[in-house]
Image (cartoon, rainbow, N blue to C red):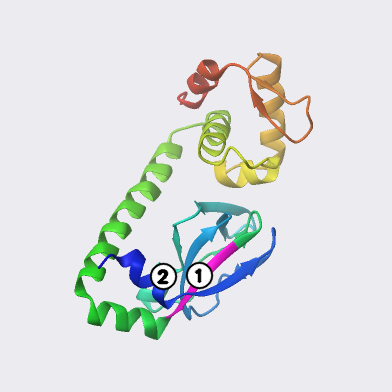
Amino acid sequence: MKLQDLLDKAETLRRYKSGQTIFEAGDEPLGLYKVNSGLIKLDSTSSNGAAHTLRLIGPGGLVGYRALFAGENYYASAIAVEDTVLSFVPKNDILALFRDHPEAAMQFLEFLSRDLRLAESKWTGQMDKDAAARVADAILFLQDNFPQQNWTRKEIAQWAGTTPETVIRTLANFEKEGIVNQSSGRSIQITNRQLLLAKSEEE
């Protein structure tokens, strides 16, 4: 039996409005969340008070598992980016599921391994890039993976590991170079994808 099927059987639906907090950093994990529809982000706050988006999780994704199995409080806060429906599986049900279905535990380990690889890729990809390259990379990633969402300059900054002011200045420069168009307000239209891709690869 697949892990997804087992989770579906144990689920309790919870609904969240855009901007609503699902759990906060420091909270004790009581179970596991699966995204049925919508989009959520995991935000962590640095020592200087800056928020950084660690992950974005869409339909089918799992949330809250690291702290749950590590026996730790949440390191990051989970926030609904848009109206979202989550399945919640209590901790005891998860542990019983893995006890009764060892194959589900192996499937979960595969999921964790893929998730860790994506996190490592994001971190290493940003290490040697300047702020403009990280902004370019963030725009490409966010629009390619979540095209339905109009991302704010603050949200782009949190994903790129910089400040909203830097994002605003960078976008203004990109617009002068004919790379993006911001004439429709919050929406950012990519007008020269190849040049934006080149910007994202600069170090």
Q: Quadrant of residue 142?
A: top right
Secondary-structure class at tag 2: helix
- The part of the chain drawn in magenta is 85-90
**Residue flagged by tag 1: what amino acid is it?**
Ser
Percent x, y of residue 145: 51, 39
Magenta span contains residue 86: yes
Task: Identify which residue is drawn at 44% across, 57% down.
Answer: 60
Q: Which one is in front, 43 or 85?
A: 85
Quadrant location of residue 71? bottom left
Q: Position of residue 68 (x, y in %)?
A: 41, 75
- Secondary structure, magenta segment, majority class: strand
Nearest the viewer among 53 and 47 is 53
Identify the residue position indicated by label 2 in the image: 8
The answer to whether residue 173 is above or below residue 19 is above
Which quarter of the rendering shows the N terminus? Answer: bottom left
Q: Residues within 10 Å of mark 2 (few under 14, many from 20)?
A: some
Tell me the number on the disc at residue 87: 1
> Where is 76 relative to 68, above or below?
above
Q: Position of residue 93 (x, y in %)?
A: 38, 83
Are dots 1 and 2 in contact, CB under 8 Å?
A: yes
